[in-house]
Amino acid sequence: MPIIKGIIVGHGNFSEVMLKTAEQIVGKQDYVELVSNTRMSCALLNEELKKVVENTNKHETIVFVDLPGGSCTISCYNLLKNREDLNVICGINLPVLIEFFMLREKYPAEQLVPILVKKGKESIFKLEKK
């Protein structure tokens, strides 16, 4: 099974920091693109994302967005209008990204996305002493 490509989209240097942190845990990763909205209008961000997504070389792709709202999510939503095959997960966290890297060669995107969403939900909780 071919590896699933990841695109991390975020505000500021969020994407870079998320990737570098995950790589400290799981090792260097290939087939990952980073997109930042820094100094970009919505129109420029739309064009940048379109270019990155079109450059997936027929890899299945999952796009991870930092927030479930804002310019990054709006730009990803605009992509979905013409790319129904695209998978976009909003509200990424480190456990989700690590899980993606560990499983992206084992599952097709349509099976991996629900696993990642579940992981994201399970990784947010209040820590309490017993």
Image (tube, rainbow, N blue to C red):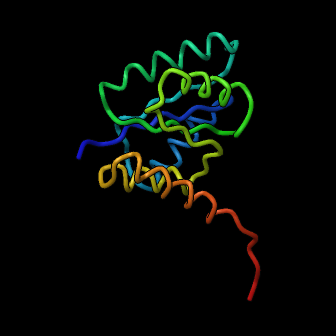
Q: Is 84 or 52 nearer to us in this picture?
A: 84
Relative to residue 24, is residue 63 depicted above or below? above
Task: Tell me which corner region of the image, top left, top right, bottom left or bottom right, holds residue 130.
Answer: bottom right
The percent position of residue 83, horizontal first and vertical second, equals: 47, 25
The percent position of residue 6, horizontal first and vertical second, equals: 44, 37
> Which residue is at a point 63% across and 23% down the rendered structure image?
75
Task: Tell me which corner region of the image, top left, top right, bottom left or bottom right, holds residue 123.
Answer: bottom right
> Which residue is at a point 62% across and 28% down the rendered structure image?
77
Q: Is residue 52 left or right of residue 60?
A: right
> Which residue is at a point 37% across and 44% down the rendered structure image?
28
Relative to residue 107, is residue 20 depicted above or below? above
The percent position of residue 44, horizontal first and vertical second, equals: 62, 10
Q: Is residue 82 left or right of residue 14?
A: left
Q: Is residue 29 left or right of residue 46?
A: left
Q: Is residue 123 left or right of residue 106?
A: right
**Marker count (numbered):** 0
Task: Tell me which corner region of the image, top left, top right, bottom left or bottom right, holds residue 11.
Answer: top right
The percent position of residue 10, horizontal first and vertical second, equals: 63, 32
Q: Residue furthest left?
A: 1
> Which residue is at a point 55% across and 61% down the rendered structure image?
119
